[in-house]
Image: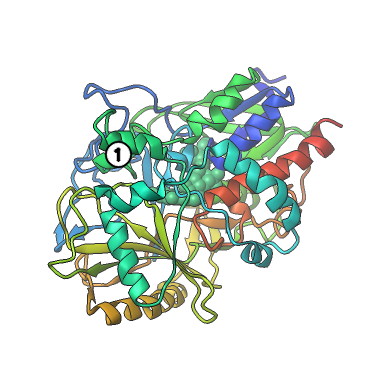
Amino acid sequence: GLPDFSQAVVIGTGYGAAVTALRLGEAGIPTVMLEMGQLWDTPSADGSVFSPMLSPDKRSMWLKDRSEMPLASFLWFDINRNIERYTGVLDRVRYGDMSVYLGRGVGGGSLVNGAMAVTPRRSYFEEILPDVDAGEMYGTYFPRANAELGVNEIDRDWFEDCDAYQYARLSRKHAEKAGYRTTFVPSVYDFDYMRREEAGEVPRSALDSEVIFGNNHGKRSLDKTYLAAALGTGNVTIKTLQEVRDIRRAADGTYRLTVRELDETGGTVARREMGARHLFLGAGSIGSTELLVRARDTGTLPGLGEEIGRGWGPNGNVMLGRANHMWNLTGSLQSGMPALGIDAWDDPAHPVFAEIAPMPAGIELWASLYLAITKNPARGHFTYDAASDSAKLQWTAEQGQASIDAAKVHFDRINGVNNTVYRHDLFGDTRAFENRFTYHPLGGVVLGEATDLYGRVKGYDNLYVTDGALIPGSTGVNPFVTITALAERNVDRVLAADIRR
Ligand code: FAD
């Protein structure tokens, strides 16, 4: 045998992976998690674990020479800065007309995301995954996911008079004037902690602009919830700076992985082989899809079908800003954690859920920012590129146009009623709508298409996908609660039917 064999291996440490590892560990299954990023628990010389948001250092980005903020400019000034190449926490993977932001490290996207913990509308969930029992999801698995993730809601009275959400109250006023409904967004950021930040009782994080480069305090990222519980079972180990490159099948039906160990500048320290009886892919929509596209097209898992690599979408993401009148202040203090959304999902022609996003620059910008989630049926797919040994996303700007059109209908109305205009200086050129990046990559190994209805990859046994790759391109809301709940459902079945049997 191999020196390094485990009954279960989980690739990645994001939402799908963390759920799976906890439930395997509870069931007494020895489980190894392989994560290409670092463990973020040790303060640097400045006393903080993560980079400051407004003066990014090497900790901010995954192996880049320059920071790559989603808002490329203010008044056309480039706000990015040169940094040292390092295995930092936020990655931006570029493909032609689309780039994808990803979290890297123990906790995956939970380290860098906006903490918005939204359960999708049941009717839309039934539309995107019609073969999944919605009664079971809404009766058992969504409640379980919300409880384990530590989802909490903002105190309404505090929201109404704190400085940190003046920007959200102003956007609400403008939306309501145009006839729109707003809704509070639950969060995994601890709102009690945020109140204590405002009171000056604890170190600031959300109120110190922190979000996409990591929160030094206050956020219930996966390392504090699911992954802590998984380690607590005593059956789960997490190995960091371990990138899985290749997957093949041994003659005895177990899996063999080639794992590249990285150093902190991305160099290769070693390559190792690992074995697993049950292999769970939780490397995210981009990571899990790439592993399977590579395995199919290089012939290491030749039985994988044509559905692998299909059904990808950016959750209809569009970002935009509005310019406010001089007398409408958004405030120089803005919580990095959004708490309110404009809900126009019932619009029959142009369903949109627009989160009211902060611009936590520390100064008044007279701007309101939004991340709109739209319903766009266009889907991309991945192809294997032998020269770079990677999977390339095929997605064109034209495919994203319907998302811009939908957002424009509603924000034209909001601007019209309030006599305001779009900002044209935020995205590096003069465009008002930015949809060349997404925070919400979904699909690539779609449930019920490339896998069975529980994430078992078609053509192989004991091979599973657990993460955002399962969701067909759209959830209508921010996706991590959906990913978590679906992983809870799938692992329940897999444990009962495939592992404990
Ligand atoms: P991920 O969380 O992406 O985890 C995958 C993990 O696998 C990563 O840690 C990665 O390093 C690792 N990995 C990848 N490939 C390999 C490999 N080959 N070998 C070893 N390890 C590998 N969603 C919300 O619901 N609410 C929000 O407010 C929100 N805000 C966001 C803000 C930002 C800036 C970003 C980037 C995302 C945001 N999201 C938000 C999206 C959310 O974070 C993702 O949908 C979610 O993290 C996806 O979970 P996952 O389990 O699919 O994979």
Of residue 421 and residue 38, the one placed in the foreground of this image is 421
- Name the residue tied to disc 1: 60
Please say whether residue 340 is visible from this viewpoint.
yes
Please say whether residue 337 is visible from this viewpoint.
no
Q: State whether residue 280 is above or below residue 436.
A: above
Spot the residue most to the front: 157
- Residue 485 position within the rendered picture, expressed as x and y whole percent measured from the top left: 64, 46
Of residue 98 and residue 430, the one placed in the foreground of this image is 430
Q: Secondary structure at mark 1?
A: helix
Q: Residue at x 59, y 49 (%)?
A: 483
| Position of residue 408 in the picture relative to residue 117 (left or right) | left
Q: State whether residue 392 is above or below residue 322.
A: above
Q: State whether residue 248 is above or below residue 97.
A: above
Q: Residue at x 54, y 60 (%)?
A: 382
- Residue 316 position within the rendered picture, expressed as x and y whole percent measured from the top left: 47, 66
Q: Quadrant of residue 10?
A: top right
Q: Quadrant of residue 123?
A: bottom right
